[in-house]
Amino acid sequence: MTEVRRFTHDSRIPGWDRAADLTKQPAVIPDSATTEVPDDLRAAIEDAMRRFPKEDAAFIPALYAVQDKYGWCSPEGIEQAASVLDRTPAALTAVATFYDMFRMEPLGRKTVYVCDNISCSLCGADELLAALEEELGEEPDVHVRGFECLGACDIAPMASVNGIYVGPIALDEVPELARQIREGEDPLPQRQLLRRPCADPKAGEQ
């Protein structure tokens, strides 16, 4: 039996011992003439394409547009985006599965991402996540999960609520936050990052 070659860290060289599947159909770009794309989705993707010199650079905003439209990066939505971008669905799927913020299965449209990286964890993120899961875990339209670093260490522990950065969040604020999320209200306005006063009173002046 032939010995399997390994790197020093013991991982096998990927794919060296597997024959290429020559019967597999090649990737195909969806026909833009026959692929039906909702007008609002097409407009969002074409707007992103105008802002970048290459179509590939518009992949991420295109995937966000798909997710906003369908609630997740559905196969149908990815195919529609691929037809507008003139790329294969596989190329878009590769990007969508690489990044943590894209959902590859239907989940609640209301998102609560609790940062669980080191700064937030040291400030009680684990307890915050558990409390939010207990409050909202049974809500079919709410998706609660831990998230690897949201880049807002100065307001730890924090969460992204439907894209709005909120923090620091105390455990006794969780019931009110959960109610606001259920009812579609502004989440903890006094804790929102964008509403914090700026240290420089002249910031933004020309």
Image: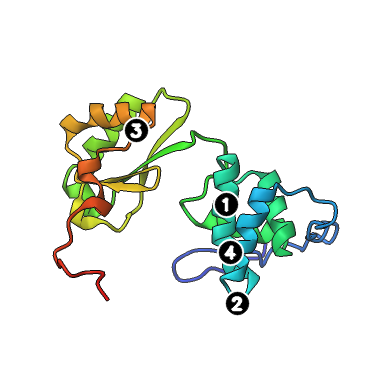
Mark with earlier residue (3, 4): 4
Whole-angstrom CA distance, mark 1 to mark 2, is 19 Å
Q: Label 3 vs label 4: CA separation? A: 29 Å
The residue tagged 3 is: 185
Local secondary structure at mark 2: loop
- Amino acid residing under circle 4: Ala
Residue under circle 4? 48
Q: Position of residue 97 (x, y in %)?
A: 55, 53
Dot 2 amino acid type: Pro
Q: CA distance from mark 4 to mark 2?
A: 10 Å
The quadrant of the rendering that contains the N terminus is: bottom right
Q: Residues within 10 Å of mark 2 (few under 14, many from 20)?
A: few
Q: CA distance from mark 3 to mark 1?
A: 23 Å
- Dot 4 or dot 2, earlier in sequence: 4
Q: Is 103 placed left or right of 87 in the picture?
A: left
For marks 2 and 3, give the CA distance: 38 Å
Q: Residues within 10 Å of mark 4 (few under 14, many from 20)?
A: some
- Comparing labels 3 and 1, the label whose residue is closer to the camera: 3
Classify 137 as above or below 186: above
Please tell me which of labels 2 and 3 falls first in the chain.
2
Q: Quarter-wise, where is residue 42 in the image?
A: bottom right
C-alpha span from label 4 to label 1: 10 Å
Q: Mark 2 = which residue?
A: 53
| Residue at (56% x, 36% y) in the render | 106
Q: Which mark is residue 65?
A: 1
Name which residue type carries label 1.
Answer: Ala
Query: As shown in the figure, which amino acid type bears the numbered disc 3?
Result: Glu
Which residue sits at x=63%, y=59%?
A: 45
